Every structure is written in structure tokens, then in C-alpha cells.
Image (cartoon, rainbow, N blue to C red):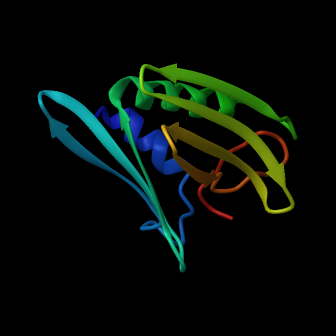
Amino acid sequence: MNKKLWNFYYRWIVPDKPDIRMLQWFVRRQDSWYEWTESSRNLVRRVKISIKVLRWLVSIFIEASKVQGKVIRRWKFKEHFAEFYCSLKYNDNGRFVSFIAIQGRNKSIIITPEASYMGDGVISSTK
């Protein structure tokens, strides 16, 4: 994976707990598949996505990082076997991107907060 994509992805991770969200690379039948995992105290949410969906997701992160203020945005992407929804939202703790993957009867929701949001659209890893 491109180093710039990794650097951008890590800007959205909570700096105190870097092991909360991670991408693991799987190669199966010459296709690249990625597993995105979010673990909490009670459960683990896991979704497998293709390289096409991962590139779409990174473009959403780039677009979301350019948005300033308290704005709600939504995106949708369909692949031949699944539907993916992404939305930029905010609450009292700051802005976050929620990623919903619906693959058949399985539904996975992963929430990725910004490292910090200062109100003027500046993303910073320090508080």
C-alpha cells in the first residue's frame, strides 16, 4: 500500500490507542483483499474489502479532511456483492467518519474519529 495512504489513514486514528483500528493485507487468488478491524471491550467488528473499495474509502477520507465546520456528508458505493455507505458526522467529542458495509445478511459498522478537531478544519494528532 502506498506510504501516503498509510500516513493519511493514521491521521484519523486515536493517538492514545493505536491498536484500536488496523488494516491487514490479505492476498487471495491474486486479488488484494483488506480486513479492517475495530475492537472494543465487548466485541470485534470486522469487514473485508477489495482494493477498489479501499481506494474509494481513502478518497472519502481525503474529501472529509478538506471539509470545514460542522457539516454532515454522505457517500454510497456499490460493488457486485456488497453495498458500502460512508458518512461524515459530528457530536460533542468531535467529527467522525462512519463506514457501513452490507454484504448479504452481514452488516458491519466501523467508526473512525478524527485525531482532534479544532473547529476551523485543522486536523492535528496532538491535543
Residue furthest front in the image: 105
Looking at the picture, how far across and down is residue 79, in whole percent? 46, 21
Residue at (42%, 26%) from the top-left corner?
Answer: 81
Q: Quadrant of residue 55?
A: top left
Please indicate, yes or no, whether residue 30 appears anywhere in the rendered image.
yes
Which quadrant is the C terminus positioned in? bottom right
Residue furthest left in the image: 29
Looking at the picture, how far across and down is residue 119, in whole percent? 85, 47
Looking at the picture, how far across and down is residue 33, in whole percent? 28, 37
Q: Is residue 73 left or right of residue 124?
A: right
In the displayed structure, would residue 24 be above or below residue 15? above
Which quadrant is the N terminus positioned in? top left
Residue nearer the viewer, 81 or 67: 81
In the displayed structure, would residue 70 be above or below residue 66? below
Residue at (54%, 50%) from the top-left corner?
Answer: 108
Residue at (12%, 27%) from the top-left corner?
Answer: 30
Q: Is residue 103 left or right of residue 97?
A: left
Residue nearer the viewer, 15 or 81: 81
Residue nearer the viewer, 82 or 124: 82
Residue at (47%, 44%) from the top-left corner?
Answer: 9
Give the mark count.
Answer: 0
Please indicate, yes or no, whether residue 67 appears anywhere in the rendered image.
no
Looking at the picture, how far across and down is residue 71, in whole percent? 85, 35
In the displayed structure, would residue 31 be above or below residue 23? above
